[in-house]
Amino acid sequence: MTNDEFNNKLDGIRVRFVASLAGKVDEFETLMDRIVSDEDAAQALEELRLGVHKLRGVAPTLGLQKLGSIAAESEDSIIAMTKGGDPTQTAGAFLGAFRALVDEMRIAAKG
Amino acid sequence: MKILAVDDDEFILELLEAAMASAGYPDMTTASSGAQALDIVANSAEPFDCFLFDIQMPEMDGIELCSHIRQIETYRKTPILMITAMSEREYVDRAFAAGATDYVTKPFDVLELGTRVAMAERLVNEINKARKREQTLDVLTEKLVSGNIVSITDPLDVDDVHGFLNYPTFENYILQLGRGNYFSSSVFALKITNIKAIYDRCKGSEFEFIITDIADAISENLKGETCFFTYAGNGVFLCVFSRFKDLIQEDLPYLVQDTALQMGLVFPDGSPLEIKLIQGEAKSPGVFAKPGSLSVLDDAIRDVEMRHATRDDTDHKPQTSNLWNARLGRKRFAL
């Protein structure tokens, strides 16, 4: 595979990844509804963490560094919350990081 | 080189496929879960030469998958690269303990990944060469009748000893500690001071068996510690602990000599084998160490060799008082 072929391939993956972000925002917000309404909250939180974790890995590899670092903060905030600590602080940090993540995903989705 | 990549993210799998093809490795199979990967491995007509595993996957994570793969005889030494967003030391340690040979953190650089897979390919070639050599009748004969088949300076691999990593994997672990800025690490060397006398009395594979026994004795004394070690050749074992260097005790030689004594190590002719060990000063990779540098290993080896050169061998017999001190010291530390 030549460099040009590789770059074309990478561009194609990036376009499809960005196109998938709007659907992911909906998915994350549905999970957040479950967490807030305490409907199987622990399971929903773990699903959210796994989804955010994927973003953390793939976004910066495709050149979306800011989205990657916000996803990293968001995942860390979920881990901090599950490890205990002052709930008002950890929950507050989690909500703040989640809002920032969803905002950045929407911005990235618009290209 | 036949590669199997496992990740539950379709974009990462596509990226890996493109990156590997671009690096000259187009023969890649993908799986989206640990279970699917094991199924592919079980049904593959040709064995895989290299594995790329994500860590965070639902149901079976990449570390558990790594352990399963290592239990398959064909894949006991096959390179396994963990490619993951998990940069915490806990994951790095667990991955290497489970049998990973290298660790790449996401986001990964495509060129860097190609280089790391090329290193894995060199390892595959070494393994294949060693296997062929083992199978050669000439070598089998040589093992039976002539001198050592390894050089005294060769790093050696040891099977089934807890905490032991082969030398290239140990280097990868040290490099990963540098990349992750895990400053609370210390490296030190243990030297068998009578290595030449031991080596000269061995032929064929006997020297390798003795090194394995000594590695076993070291491992016994490192139980419960977060540490890895390797055999660097020339009688030197390198150990890395996840502790600051000030917390490293210098009693390990006495404990290992004692364990070796209890194990009743003997030469192949049945005569007792006494090992004499010294420990070098613990070295820390340091906050300002150049990333990608292995100089801490050279420092640790240099230190123990200097101590060896300036000390009298008779000093290092496992004196009872030293052993008591060592054991009591350890007890105090554990409390």
Image (tube, rainbow, N blue to C red):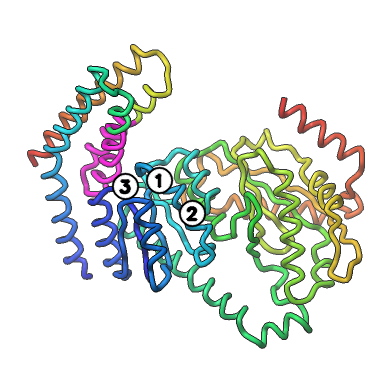
Contact flag, marks 2 and 3 (Cβ < 8 Å): no
Question: Is tag 1's residue or tag 3's residue first in the polypeptide sequence?
Answer: 1
Q: Residue furthest bottom?
A: B138
Q: Please provide the residue range marked out in magenta.
A: A48-75
Query: Which residue is tagged 3?
Result: B107
Q: Amino acid at mark 1?
A: Met
C-alpha distance separating marks 2 and 3: 26 Å
One can see residue B47 in this view: yes
Contact flag, marks 1 and 2 (Cβ < 8 Å): yes
**Secondary structure character of the magenta stretch overall:** helix
Give the percent coordinates (x, y) of residue B148. Answer: 75, 76
Q: Can residue B178 be found in the magenta stretch?
A: no
Query: Which residue is tagged 1?
Result: B60
Mark 2 belongs to which subunit?
Answer: B
- Which residue sits at x=69%, y=68%? B153
Q: Name the residue nearer the viewer: B104 or B261.
A: B261
